[in-house]
Image (cartoon, helix red, strand yellow):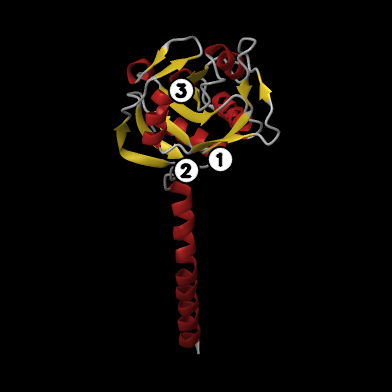
Amino acid sequence: MRVFKVMQMRWRRSCAREVYRPLLAALLLALFAPLASAGTVLNPPRPIEHLKLIDQHGAPVTADSLAGRWTVLFFGFTHCPDVCPTTLARLAGVQRRLPEHLRPKVRFMLVSVDPMRDTPQRLAEYVGQFGQDFVGATAPLGELAPLLKELGVSYAYTAQDDGQHANHGGHAGHAMPAYTITHSETLYVLDTQARLYAVFTDPKDDYALQRDLTAWVGGR
């Protein structure tokens, strides 16, 4: 009888080990495995051929001028009613939550797909609402289009239904047709050599962006 009880206890212990072993392995994996990037990382990073813009101060934006810091690009326009201000506010939150010693190493840039209305002055006023280190940039559409195509930025101009014309910061007698623009919401992360390093298709996951930037900029 005693032998039977000993065998029964050993069997129960063995069963318990079989039940809890996979649970323990899953727990350890969750605790110690490195978090996967929320963005799509390019390996190796890809040089950008058509990076030629003008910032809100009238200075050229090129691969050389961006080198030395990480850059987060977002494509939009200052007359955007919802997506752009919301996304830029999220990026401002990411900037504030980055470790203090990493903040100077990251810039956030709005590239306007509306160069007809988004003059340097207009861009300066707009991006200044989100932070001192935010950059606004654009280029004439003929020069901007190759960059948009290279990065796969989708955009479309749509005339407003009322057909009104408005003067958006231009001179009297130079009113422009009222229109809006639909565009993709993707974020593009450039490394310190201004190469495309990662792509985030969901700008709403700003905490994931913050986590990944902290790892990349801080050298993991």
Residue 26, x across and y down, in percent: 47, 58
Using a 10 Å C-alpha cutoff, classify the residue at mark 2 as few (fewer than 14 neighbours), some (14 to 19) or many (20 or more): some
Q: Which of 142 and 12 is in front in this view?
A: 142
Residue 115, x across and y down, in percent: 51, 22
Using a 10 Å C-alpha cutoff, classify the residue at mark 1 as few (fewer than 14 neighbours), some (14 to 19) or many (20 or more): few
* Residue 114 sits above or below residue 21 on the image: above
Of callouts 1 and 3, the N-terminal one: 3
Q: Which residue is drawn at 49% across and 63% down?
A: 23
Amino acid at dot 2: Ala
Residue 62, x across and y down, in percent: 36, 18
* Disc number placed over residue 38 in the picture, else none: 2
- The kind of secondary structure element at disc 3 is strand
Q: Kindly indicate whether the residue at mark 1 contacts the one at mark 2 (C-beta within 8 angstroms).
A: yes
The residue that mark 1 highlights is: 205
* Disc number placed over residue 37 in the picture, else none: none
Q: Is 20 on the left-hand or right-hand side of 149?
A: right
Amino acid at dot 3: Val
Question: Is residue 102 in view from this perspective?
Answer: no
How many labels were placed on the picture? 3
- The kind of secondary structure element at disc 2 is loop
Q: Quadrant of residue 220?
A: top left
Q: Is 17 on the left-hand or right-hand side of 182?
A: left
The residue that mark 3 highlights is: 106
Q: Which residue is drawn at 35% across and 25% down?
A: 194
